[in-house]
Amino acid sequence: MIKINENYLNLQQNYLFPTIAKKVREYKADNPSADIISLGIGDVTRALPRACVEALHKASEEMGCEKTFRGYGPEQGYSFLIDAIIENDYKAYGIDLQPEEVFVSDGAKCDVGNIQEVFSTEAAVAVADPVYPVYLDTNIMAGRSVKKLPCLAENGFAPKVPDFKADLIYLCSPNNPTGAVMTKAQLKEWVDYAKKNGSVIIFDSAYKEYIQEADLPRSIYEVEGAKEVAIEIRSFSKTAGFTGLRCAYMVVPLALKGRGADKEVRINDLWRRRHTTKFNGVPYIVQRAAEAVFSPEGKAEVKELIAYYMENARIIKEGLSAAGLKAYGGENAPYIWLKLPEGIKSFDFFDILLSRANVVGTPGSGFGDCGEGYFRLTSFGSRENTLKAVERIKKLKL
C-alpha cells in the first residue's frame, strides 16, 4: 500500500461546516415539515448587484464572438481588475501598490489554505482561538507546529502579541467568528512584533466592507512598515455576493522577504511561481463582474447590500439582548457571537436551537477551545427569516 501523509490523521475527523450540514439533513429527514431557518454558514442570500449581472451578460456575449473570445487569461488576473482593485481598495485609502503585488484568485478560503505552501514546514505558526478552521487545518496538514492565541471577552476577542516567537501569524479583522475588529494600535503591535522576529502575518480582511466606524483600519497596510511583514487577503464573496461566482484577491508586497538556504528571497516571486503552476486563473466573465463592483452603480448596490445585512445584525443582537442573552460583534461585522448561559455546551445548544426553534447556527467550539460556551449567528439571511428566527430564540427562555 502507498504511504499516506500522516499529518491528515491529526485533523478533526470532519470539517466543521459539512458536519453541521449533515446534522441538519438528518433532522430534516426525521422532521420533513420543519421550517428550518439558517443563520449558520456565512452564505449570502441576496442576489448579485445588477451592475455585476450586466457585466456578466456582456462578457458572456464577448465569449460567444470569435473577435472578442478569450481563452486562457493571465493566471495573476486581468489588468482591468487589478487596476480597479488598486485604485478603489487601496489608493482610496492612501495605500500605493504595484500591479505585480496583486493576485486574483477563486476565493479567500483557497488563498488562506494555499499561501502556507511557500513557507517551511518547520515554521512555527500562531493562530487566534477561536479561529476560522482553514487557518489551523491547512497547517496541520503540512505538519507544522501550531500555537493558539486565546481570544477572550476580557481582551475584546483580539489576540495578544505572544511572549514566544511565531514565524507565521494569522489575523482576521473583522473577525470570523467573533465579529471583533482590531484597532490600528493593535495592528501596529503585531507589525512591530513581526519586524522584530522576522515573522510573516497573513491578514484576512474579507469582511472589511462591514466596518462602520471610520477610525478602524480596513487594511493592515494602513500601518507603516506592514508591507515588509504582511500578506493581505480579500474577497468579493461577502462584499458583493460572489459566493457562487468565486473571486478574491491577495496582496503579496514586493518588500516582503523570506530566507532561503543562502540568500533572501522575495515571497512575491515564490507565490507567483506557485500561482502560475497550480492555477489557471479566474474566468474572464467573473473578473468582469468583479470589476463592476467598483463602478458607481456597483458601489451603490454593494453599499445597499452591506446596509441590509448590518440591519439584520442589529436585529439579531438587540433581540438576543431582549431575551437576556449577552452577545458580541454585529456592529462592524456580519457575525454575532452569542455567550451561552452557564453550563450549556455549544454543540448542545446547536441541538436545542435546531429541535426547539428550527434555527441553525454554528457551535463556537467548532472554531476552537476558547469558542466553547459561545455560538455564532450570521446576518446573511432574509429580513423575514431573521425576524422569525429572533422571535423563535426569544421563546426558548433559556
Image (cartoon, rainbow, N blue to C red):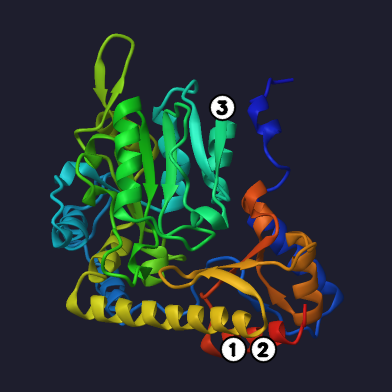
Residue type pointed to by label 3: Ser
| Location of residue 150 with respect to 302 vertically, above or below | above
Task: Give the mark nearer the N terminus: 1 vs 3.
Answer: 3
Real-space Cα separation, disc 3 to disc 2, in angstroms:
44 Å
Q: Is residue 281 in view?
A: no
Residue displayed at 46% across by 24% down? 123
| Location of residue 158 with respect to 310 vertically, above or below | above
Q: Residue furthest top?
A: 262
**Left or right side of 256 for 142:** right
Residue at the spot of label 2: 391
Residue type pointed to by label 1: Leu
- Residue closest to the eye, 220 or 354: 220
Q: Residue furthest right?
A: 30
Residue at the spot of label 3: 145
| Location of residue 153 with respect to 380 vertically, above or below | above
- Asked whether the beta carbons under mark 1 and mark 2 sit within 8 Å of each other, the answer is yes
Q: Position of residue 381 (x, y in %)?
A: 54, 79
- Residue closest to the eye, 391 or 46: 391
Element at badge 1? helix
Residue displayed at 70% across by 67% down? 340
Residue at the spot of label 1: 387
- Asked whether the beta carbons under mark 3 and mark 2 sit within 8 Å of each other, the answer is no
